[in-house]
């Protein structure tokens, strides 16, 4: 028997989580309910936060977007394609239209799956995750949020309330590989951002390590080697960039692909996303 509790607002949700730290939060239910329906997980208590209005809002303050954890992917695609194009591109690849109407970034963060499509764009953009409890609110860099498959820096009594991302300062790309283009768990994915004003590159990979991973060495290499005045994208730089992004991963063999295939896929996706972003930068 599963006890079902419903939060009326954010304060109530925090109070319920403090009283029942072992409880699982549920908003869109696109992951939790699948697990329950197929008997892959057992839950003694669920806290429904789908009616918490504070989690379903987003706002812009200068060059930062505060994205509520409960904003569904459909709204990200429709309302934030200009400010957060990388996340919007990833959102378009998630499930079906019905799933995108319910699923949220907060859900991806809560499950902490290395295959979560929304997660690499957060790392590439150097986002921070806002979490709250009865003890207060804190911010965790997205690159430090994930600690293992299905594990994160969240304390038992904490709720993900929002994500803070910088407004795109340049092109942002996302690509994933799967048996088909939609409604599929990624075999590998790559997110990339370019910030020409600061000559900075952001890049991360998903489905290729126990957690989403930032490719720090590849970022530094590309930032130093790219001709930010508008030169061509040299083939050796592109090739080395792909190698370095793949080198940041530590994939496994499973039913969706071998470790070697995943490394190769990450390298290819890294080269593609950098090429697309570079072309977009100099078309504008």
Image (cartoon, helix red, strand yellow):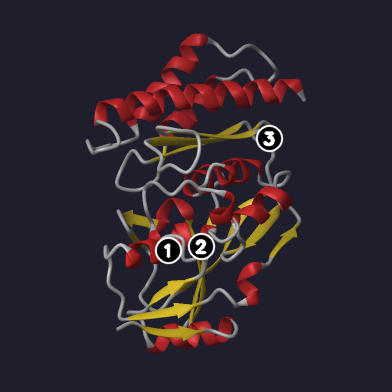
The circle drawn on residue 106 is 2
Sequence-wise, which precedes: disc 2 or disc 3? Answer: 2
Q: Which structural element holds mark 2? A: helix
Which quadrant does the N terminus fall into? bottom left
Residue at horizontal 39 percent and vertical 60 percent from the top = 111
The circle drawn on residue 170 is 3
Q: Residues within 10 Å of mark 1 (few under 14, many from 20)?
A: many
Q: Residues within 10 Å of mark 3 (few under 14, many from 20)?
A: some
Residue reaching furthest front? 37
Picture layout, residue 275 above or below residue 57: above
Residue at horizontal 63 percent and vertical 11 percent from the top = 232
Task: Tell me where residue 239 appears, x and y as whole percent.
Answer: 44, 15
Determine whether label 1 and label 2 are within 8 Å by CB: yes
Which quadrant does the C terminus fall into? top right
Query: Which residue position is annotated with label 1?
Result: 110
3D distance between C-alphas at marks 3 and 1: 29 Å
Residue 237 placement, left or right of 151: right
Disc number lying in front (2 or 3): 2
């Amino acid at each position: 028997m599963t006890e079902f509790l419903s939060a009326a607002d954010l304060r109530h949700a925090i109070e319920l989580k403090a009283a029942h730290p072992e409880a699982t939060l549920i908003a869109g239910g696109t992951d939790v309910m699948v697990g329950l329906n197929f008997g892959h997980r057992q839950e003694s208590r669920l806290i429904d936060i789908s009616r918490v209005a504070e989690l379903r809002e987003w706002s812009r303050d200068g060059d930062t977007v505060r994205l509520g954890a409960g904003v569904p992917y459909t709204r990200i695609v429709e309302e934030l394609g200009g400010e957060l194009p990388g996340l919007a591109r990833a959102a378009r690849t998630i499930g079906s239209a019905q799933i995108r109407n319910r699923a949220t970034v907060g859900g991806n963060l809560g499950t902490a799956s290395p295959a979560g499509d929304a997660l690499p764009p957060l790392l590439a953009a150097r986002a921070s995750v806002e979490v709250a409890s009865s003890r207060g609110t804190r911010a965790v860099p997205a690159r430090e949020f994930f600690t293992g498959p299905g594990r994160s820096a969240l304390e038992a009594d904490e709720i993900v309330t929002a994500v803070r991302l910088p407004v795109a300062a340049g092109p942002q790309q996302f690509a994933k590989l799967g048996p088909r283009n939609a409604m599929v768990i990624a075999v590998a994915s790559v997110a990339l951002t370019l910030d020409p004003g600061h000559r900075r590159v952001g890049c991360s990979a998903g489905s290729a390590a126990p957690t989403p991973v930032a490719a720090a060495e590849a970022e530094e290499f590309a930032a130093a080697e790219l001709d930010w005045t508008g030169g061509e994208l040299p083939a050796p730089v592109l090739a080395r960039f792909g190698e370095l992004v793949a080198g940041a991963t530590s994939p496994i063999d499973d039913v969706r692909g071998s470790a070697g295939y995943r490394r190769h896929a990450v390298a290819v996706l890294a080269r593609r996303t950098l090429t697309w972003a570079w072309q977009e930068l100099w078309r504008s």
